[in-house]
Image: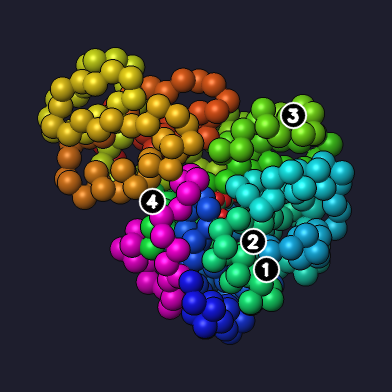
Amino acid sequence: MNQSVIEAAAELIRDGKLVAFPTETVYGLGANALDAAAVDQIYVVKGRPQTSPLIVHVSSLEMARGLVSEWPQPAAILAERFWPGPLTLVLPKAACVPDRVTAGLPTVGIRMPSHPVALALIEAAGVPIAAPSANRFTGLSPTTADHVRRSLEVPMILDGGTTDVGIESTVLSLAGREAVLLRPGMISRAQVEEAIGPVHVGSAAAGEAHASPGMHPRHYSPATPLLIVDGSSLPEGNGAYLWRETPVRCECPIQMPVEPAEYAHRLYDTLHKLDDLGLDWIAVERLPSTVEWAGILDRLERAAYHNDRTGKSRS
Ligand code: TXA
Ligand code: MG
């Protein structure tokens, strides 16, 4: 991407405006993390409750350390091993981080994204950038600039192509005595444990509601009812079946990748496209319950949440 485009976006950020930008996971809706009024606009544009804390994106370790009041050894090890990359670390916040960013929590979630456009933007802006996924609250996260364009009004969208990882970052809290996995992602619990030892699974990551503010059980949903199915019996009506091992006859059969990385990469774009077709349902073949699939399973379970609980589609 042209440096002058990055400079223009950085100027908007410094001016307290919003910019949507690509990261390696999903597109983010960014604002200067140190400017409470700028951060406020994120909540307005997304239609997001102020009880959801935002992730702050940094381009250097110094920038990360300026946002926290403690930098424990496990943070140093994980940053060294996984940054830049799809891992968010939750740590006690420094006084400079506005309460708006953390939804009043004494902790802040930080990550260094690996997308070159994200890094260039943060560096050019010279400030950390608070950004949730660039979609309306509870909608599907965007993995292309077009997904963002279709759901939000933003002064500027940086187009960095299709995102690589495809689902949101792993969120790990290092704020207490034990490391706690708050949201699984494509950096697995096993990979984190190999680096720092035992990791507990937060109840939100285990599928229960509200262990971490903002971890709403229903999240990441397409408008079309989504359900996870075990075998060959699909619902009545016209639907799509995302299969991985066993195809089943239906209106719209879709073969999904066998490997988790490729599956995650394709998932949201597939759901965005299917959502435009006006189908009665989207069924997904149940995935293995191994750590490599945990992040993907988590997103699918949240997307299916309402349908599983009520047996009906949500309005
Ligand atoms: O990959 C990602 O993480 C993307 C890209 C744009 O970086 N961002 C993203 O942001 O998914 P968002 O706002 O959609 O999700 C942020 C998650 C929420 O589940 C929130 O609860 C958690 O991070 N989080 C952020 N700060 C936290 C904190 N201080 N304590 C606990 N959880 C926190
Ligand atoms: Mg989100």
- Report the Cα–Cα distance between label 3 and label 4: 33 Å
- Judging depth in this view, the residue of 279 and 196 nearest the camera is 196
Foreground mark, 3 or 2, reads 3
Q: Amino acid at mark 2?
A: His
Foreground mark, 3 or 4, reads 3
Which stretch is magenta? Answer: 146-167
x and y percent of residue 72 in the render? 86, 46
Residue receiving disc 2: 57
Q: Amino acid at mark 4?
A: Gly
The C terminus, quarter of image: top left
Q: Which label number is shown at residue 139?
A: 4
Foreground mark, 1 or 3, reads 3
Q: Earlier in the sequence, mark 3 or mark 2?
A: 2
- Report the Cα–Cα distance between label 2 and label 4: 22 Å
Q: Earlier in the sequence, mark 4 or mark 1?
A: 1
Q: Amino acid at mark 3?
A: Glu
Which residue shows up at 68% across the image and 41% down it? 172
State if disc 1 and disc 2 touch (CB < 8 Å).
yes
Confirm or reject: label 1 Cβ below 8 Å from ligand 1: no
